[in-house]
Amino acid sequence: MNIEITSTKSEGAERRIQVAVPGAAVKDAKKRAARRVAQQVRLPGFRIGKAPAAMVEKKFADVIRQEALEAVMREAYQAVIEQEKLKLITQPHAHDVKFGDDDALSFELHCEVQPDIALAHVEGFQVKRPAATVTSDQVKDQIEHVRDARATWAPVEEKPLEGDMVVVLLAMADDAGALPEGKEYRVVLGAGQAIPAIEELLMELAPGGTVERAVRWPDDFPDEAQRGKTKTVRAELKEVKRKAVPALDDAFAREMGDFDSVEALTTAVRTDLEASAVREADAAVRGLLLDEIIGANAFDVPPSWVSNLVQSYAKAYGVPEAEHEKFAAEFRATAERQVRRELVIETLAERERLAATEADVDAKIQEMAEKRGANPGQVYAQLQKANRLREIERGITEDRVFAWLLERNTVEQQ
């Protein structure tokens, strides 16, 4: 197609291209559209496809014009992509479309293209590996966390203490000072689920007791409109439950798995924590290496990829629609950093031929199946159903990329 192309913006991954299509090309497209329409419509007194062209063009002028416009723009899109050698990553959009009386067509094409990532500097960096140590206190805290998860709650007939769970009917006065009916809440005292003044009020009551008192909301309350306000609160304590944590003995150890003693359980917890610390240290080294490479190699990031990642995180975190804009502003820098990291990994995997193959994925699934004592075919089917095959492929590729990087860079122990 004989078109005129003028670049109006070429910054980063964004492209804006002014396209002008001569009237002759549009007229030819109209003729082709008219012939197609004539073959499909029926006019009174004529068989399908036999009506005079002039009559068809007059009666279906708008349809023919629209069809011709769409056809010309599709052809123009393709011509621009081929002539400019664009590697598109988003669907092009036409803006400021103008269709003149002389049938000439013009529009501005907006699109994003694959960024050019050279990565000339990926060797010779030095990073520090965090110490992967586990203390006795960390082991103790983890065991206490496990005990806490196995705790039971039993009702008590006395005033609640910090750590108790209470069931309470709470009513808070509105702006006019009226107290509505109370709503039932379950609150663990001391867990930050209620403001301190209300917790103090509840700890004065025994089950069945009621109190009504003015309560001042703290100055750092999350809802700014409520900060520093004083409201009348009515509380009726319905129930108090106290937590009973199981004793740390050999019986408890046996309940937690194949452990015949507290010592065996402690050893297993320490082993798990040490393995987790090693994984965290490995992840830290990977992150530091990527940061060094990103800092030494400037490249553009497609804005749409960053926006898509921000939106996916907003959805995952359950961010309300009204807060999306604020969330995007706060999270955009983090999202852009994540996109840059992924682009570095993908570029190195492709350039150095480190990407996982289908055979690599099959071998990994075979390994997983052997560890589980399961059939590899069943494991594959389960992973495929859960849409996790891509995750496994990605993991293999990342491991290879970082192994390649570790051979070419220095990691010092902190």
Image: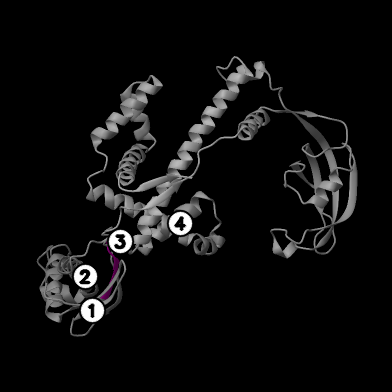
**Is residue 304 a member of the stretch shown in magenta?**
no
Region of the chain picked out in magenta, as a range: 108-114
Q: Quadrant of residue 92?
A: bottom left
- Secondary structure, mark 3, is loop
Mark toward the viewer: 2 or 4:
4
Query: Relative to 259, is 343 on the left or the right?
Result: left
Question: What distance separates the C-alpha of mark 1 from that of mark 4?
Answer: 33 Å
Coloring basis for residues? one colour
Contact (Cβ within 8 Å) of mark 1 with mark 2: no
What's the distance in space between the residues labelled 3 and 2, CA to CA?
17 Å
Q: Which numbered marker is on residue 141?
A: none
Dominant SS in magenta: strand
**Residue 183 against residue 263 in the figure, above or below:** below
Question: Which residue lies under the disc numbered 4?
Answer: 311
Q: Is residue 112 magenta?
A: yes
Say which label, 3 or 4, has the lower sequence index: 3
The Cα atoms of the two marked residues, 3 and 4, are separated by 16 Å
In the displayed structure image, the side of residue 166 where residue 254 appears, left or right: left
- The CA span between labels 2 and 4 is 31 Å
Q: Earlier in the sequence, mark 1 or mark 2?
A: 2
Q: Position of residue 321 (x, y in %)?
A: 54, 59
On the image, numbered disc 1 is attached to which residue?
Answer: 106
Q: CA distance from mark 3 to mark 1?
A: 21 Å
| Residue 67 on image: x %, y % | 21, 68
Q: Amino acid at mark 1?
A: Ser
Mark 1 in CB contact with mark 4 (< 8 angstroms): no
Residue 181 is at least partly visible in this image: no
**Neighbourhood count class around disc 4 (C-alpha, 10 Å): few under 14, some 14–19, many 20 upward:** some
